[in-house]
Image (tube, rainbow, N blue to C red):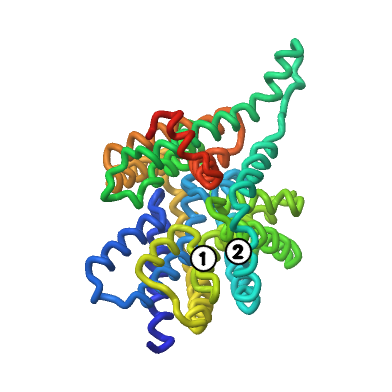
């Protein structure tokens, strides 16, 4: 196969995923699952290597362009929940385009970081994997502890009794703990007794993520009926090379952690890196989240092609690994070349689509946009997972509303993955599931 064929497949996947990324709730892994099923049904239609490159383009395009629904429609996925709050501030100031471009610049920097790591990855990552593999359960447990501890008690300054001050100070942290435990309980249900039909089991987490992260934010936007100002489209970004480098470096650090360790998402990785590098500037934060998101999605997929590693992290690599196994180091370098070209194309598509989103959002009543977004969210969940998925999304939405109402981090909703998987790795998941009456 010539080099042009995999590059062309990656570019085609980039265009397709960039367009699909504009649809709220339609996660790239859900689309990729359908593509993988079609490939299994019609094995003569496309070679497995070409399919793998098409999937690469899809994950690059999605990770770049999904900043648009997260910022303009308040419909983030699990990798972009952290960027929503600062980006919403930009949107309310008429700078939504700038926020999307900052995230895009971070994403482009994240792709550059993957390319720069190409020579050392085959040398460093295989022994590192062998070193940490026996310790994954307690490493994830420490991530959970830090995630909850980072929600430090606030308040307690209002006049009243000592008990009232104590409850006021711990209200946010308590809401975070409750959110984590309830989402973890839902995770056990989805893992051991899911109401999602078995023929669409690969969509198992879709309704939960839509309920946790998208529906509550869109419903809040619908209720409050925000009136957005005219969106300004600047000729340049207000960010120095030094701030850009700081943001990309922090995001790359968090994204690499998220890509290498199971269950840790780009949002969690970005949060850990933010604490480690003491970020304060909003621009640096948005850039770092863009970089972290790309390392989380694209970096995890690239790990599958690293010689001597072939690590299946993330939904895309897990799906492709059932159809294709890279056999030569040349494939790895072809992936990096395709990644560079796809990254450039997806960034220009982000520029184009963000301009369109900025113009549409200022001309259409925001309540109408929110209502249409909510209808799309519910429609996608029902289309892909049926009534059982709608029930899961409803429960997840109630849990996802807790952080919004109590001013705590929505990241705690990721207990849906962290709690059951960490306990399973520690050998305790089955025991807990029995206590819950699930098995």
Q: Residue 353: x and y, percent?
A: 46, 62
Disc 2 vs disc 1: Cβ atoms closer than 8 Å? yes
Checking the image for residue 129, the label placed there is 2
Residue at 22% x, 70% y: name it: 42
Circle nearer the N terminus (2, 1): 2
Query: Hey, which quadrant is residue 293 in on the image?
Result: bottom right
For the question of whether residue 68 can be seen, the reply is yes
In this view, the residue in front, 71 or 279, is 279
Q: Residue 145: x and y, percent?
A: 66, 39
For the question of whether residue 232 can be seen, the reply is no
Query: Hey, which quadrant is residue 177 in on the image?
Result: top right
Reply above or below: 112 against 150. Answer: below
CA neighbours of label 1 inside 10 A, class few (<14), some (14 to 19), many (20+): many
Figure label count: 2
In this view, the residue in front, 159 or 150, is 150
Reply above or below: 131 against 72. Answer: below
Q: Residue 150: x and y, percent?
A: 69, 39
Q: Is residue 334 left or right of residue 52?
A: right
Reply above or below: 93 against 318. Answer: above
Query: Hey, which quadrant is residue 88 in on the image?
Result: top right
Report the quarter where the N terminus lies. bottom left
Distance Cα–Cα, label 2 vs label 1? 9 Å
In this view, the residue in front, 371 or 159, is 159
> What residue does disc 1 label?
311
- Secondary structure, mark 1, is loop
Residue at 28% x, 62% y: name it: 37
Residue at 69% x, 50% y: name it: 282
CA neighbours of label 2 inside 10 A, class few (<14), some (14 to 19), many (20+): some
Q: Residue 76: x and y, percent?
A: 49, 48
């Amino acid at each position: 196969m010539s080099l042009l064929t995999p590059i062309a497949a990656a570019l085609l996947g980039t265009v397709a995923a960039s367009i699909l990324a504009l649809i709220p709730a339609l996660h790239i892994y859900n689309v990729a699952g359908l593509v993988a099923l079609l490939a299994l049904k019609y094995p003569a239609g496309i070679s497995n290597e070409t399919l793998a490159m098409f999937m690469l383009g899809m994950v690059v395009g999605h990770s770049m362009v999904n900043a648009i629904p997260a910022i303009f429609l308040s419909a983030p996925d699990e990798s972009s929940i952290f960027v929503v709050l600062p980006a919403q501030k930009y949107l309310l100031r008429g700078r939504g385009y700038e926020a999307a471009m900052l995230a895009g610049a971070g994403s482009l920097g994240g792709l550059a970081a993957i390319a720069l790591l190409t020579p050392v990855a085959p040398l460093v990552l295989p022994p590192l994997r062998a070193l940490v593999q026996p310790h994954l359960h307690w490493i994830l447990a420490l991530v959970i502890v830090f995630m909850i501890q980072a929600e430090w008690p606030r308040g307690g300054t209002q006049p009243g009794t000592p008990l009232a001050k104590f409850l006021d100070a711990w209200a946010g942290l308590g809401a975070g703990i409750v959110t984590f435990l309830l989402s973890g309980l839902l995770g056990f249900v989805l893992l051991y007794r899911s109401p999602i039909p078995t023929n669409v089991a690969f969509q198992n987490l879709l309704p939960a993520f839509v309920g946790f992260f998208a529906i509550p934010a869109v419903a809040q936007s619908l209720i409050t009926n925000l009136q957005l100002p005219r969106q300004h489209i600047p000729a340049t970004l207000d960010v120095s090379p030094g701030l850009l480098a700081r943001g990309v470096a922090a995001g790359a650090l968090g994204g690499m952690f998220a890509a290498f360790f199971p269950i840790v998402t780009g949002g969690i990785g970005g949060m850990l890196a933010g604490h480690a590098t003491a970020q304060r500037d909003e621009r640096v934060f948005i850039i770092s989240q863009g970089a972290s998101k790309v390392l989380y999605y694209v970096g995890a997929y690239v790990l599958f092609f690293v010689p001597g590693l072939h690590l299946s992290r993330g939904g895309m690599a897990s799906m492709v690994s059932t159809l294709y196994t890279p056999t030569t180091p040349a494939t790895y370098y072809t992936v990096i070349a395709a990644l560079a070209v796809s990254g450039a194309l997806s960034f220009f598509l982000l520029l184009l689509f963000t301009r369109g989103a900025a113009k549409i959002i200022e001309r259409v009543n925001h309540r109408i946009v929110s209502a249409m977004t909510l209808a799309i969210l519910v429609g996608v969940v029902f289309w892909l997972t049926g009534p059982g998925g709608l029930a899961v999304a409803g429960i997840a939405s109630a849990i996802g509303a807790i952080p919004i109402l109590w001013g705590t981090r929505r990241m705690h909703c990721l207990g849906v993955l962290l709690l059951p998987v960490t306990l399973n790795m520690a050998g305790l998941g089955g025991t807990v599931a029995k206590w819950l009456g699930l098995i």
